[in-house]
Structure formats: C-alpha cells, structure tokens
Image (cartoon, rainbow, N blue to C red):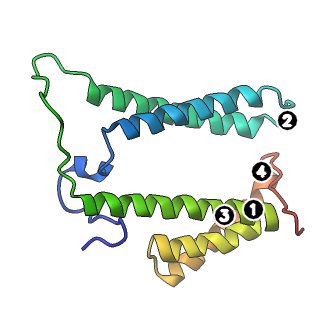
Amino acid sequence: MADEGHRDETAGSGDEFEGSLAGTTWSLGVAAGAFIVFAAAFIVSGSFSEEARLMPRLVTVGGLTFTLALLWQEWRTRRPRTGTPVPQGPVVSPVVPSQRTRELTTAGTTFLAMGVFLVLVVTTGYLPAVLLFVPMALLYGARTAPRTAVVYTLALAVVLLALPSILPVDLPEGLLS
C-alpha cells in the first residue's frame, strides 16, 4: 500500500513511475521554466570572477543538460508519430484524483521542506543545516531506518568537510556563525 505519495515500484509498467502529471501541460511548463532558470543562471554566472564562476557553471551546465533531456522527452510524447493515429477528443488520465492530490501534497511538502533547508543554511550555515535537515528528510520523507539516516548523514558530513580541500569551494557559514 502506498503512503504519502510513495508508490510501490514493483507494480505496474515503467510508465506508471513518472507520476500523474507526466505528459501534461504542467510538466512541459515546469521543464521549460527550469530550462529558463538554468539558462539565466548560466548567463549571470558569466559576470562572476574566474574563481567564483566554477561551481555555478558546473551546476547550470548539469541543469541545462537535464532540462534539455526533459524537454526532448516532453516534446517526443506530444508529437504524433507517423502511422500512429492522433487521439481525438480529450485525453482522460487513468489516475484517480486522490492519487494526484496525494502526489501534489507530497510535492508541496517537499517544496516547503527545501525552503526550511534554505532558511537553515542562511541562519546556521551549510554543514549544520545538512546535519539537521538530512536525517529529518530521510526519517520522514524516505522512511529510512534511524541507523541508515545517521550513517548517511555522517558520511555526507565527512564529504562536505573534505570538499573545500578538494575543490576551491567555500560553503555558506550562516548568520549565527
């Protein structure tokens, strides 16, 4: 049985794993909006100093790559294939409204949680925010075992502590630091 938007990934075909909004105008709009945001960020990062533009450029190139792939996928599902009849009339989604509501609630909760994470980063700094947020997200959102959440959080903390010595990256320190 699915809980809070988590689907049983062993049931059904692969197309059902995309969610109830896949192939809709909403998903195309989100893909186009994300592409515009990443393109704008890439352009803006060009005004940064040589050292400061490394990470924004890496992130935006990755984002542009993934959003282009998503836009291509969305476009491919919309264009009629040769020899395939074009559906007439409205396309009816086989998803029941309660499932869509549950998915939208989960998406909204996730969006709100990311906002809380950003507030934590601004106030406490990146590493403390990760140490607070990641276990809560794993325990609540992913429903992992407490031991898994602790191990994953500690491993991520070690990586984040080592990151400045590997790459020239300064992590946010926060207002309370």
Q: Quadrant of residue 71?
A: top left
Q: Amino acid at mark 4?
A: Ile
Query: Looking at the image, is mark 4 or mark 2 earlier in the sequence?
Result: 2
Residue ID at (88%, 69%): 176
Dot 4: element: helix
Check disc 3 and give the amino acid type. Phe
Which residue lies under the disc numbered 1?
Answer: 121
Earlier in the chain: of badge 2 and badge 1, it is 2
Mark 2 surroundings: few (<14), some (14-19) or many (≥20) residues within 10 A: few
Q: How far separated are the C-alphas under marks 4 and 1?
A: 21 Å
Circle 3 residue: 117
Question: Quick one: label 3 or label 2, which is nearer the N terminus?
Answer: 2
Vertical placement of residue 57 versus 3, above or below: above
Could you tell me which secondary element the residue under label 2 belongs to? loop
Instruction: Find residue 52 and report its image quarter.
Output: top right
Q: Which mark is residue 166?
A: 4
Residue tagged 2: 51
| Location of residue 92 with respect to 177 vertically, above or below | above
**Residue 16, position as x, y percentages in the image:** 24, 51
Along the line of sight, which residue is nearer the eye, 78 or 134? 78
Q: Give the side of residue 24 with respect to residue 128, left or right.
A: left
Residue occupying image coordinates x 44% and y 35%: 29
User: Depth-wise, is mark 4 or mark 1 nearer the camera?
Assistant: 1
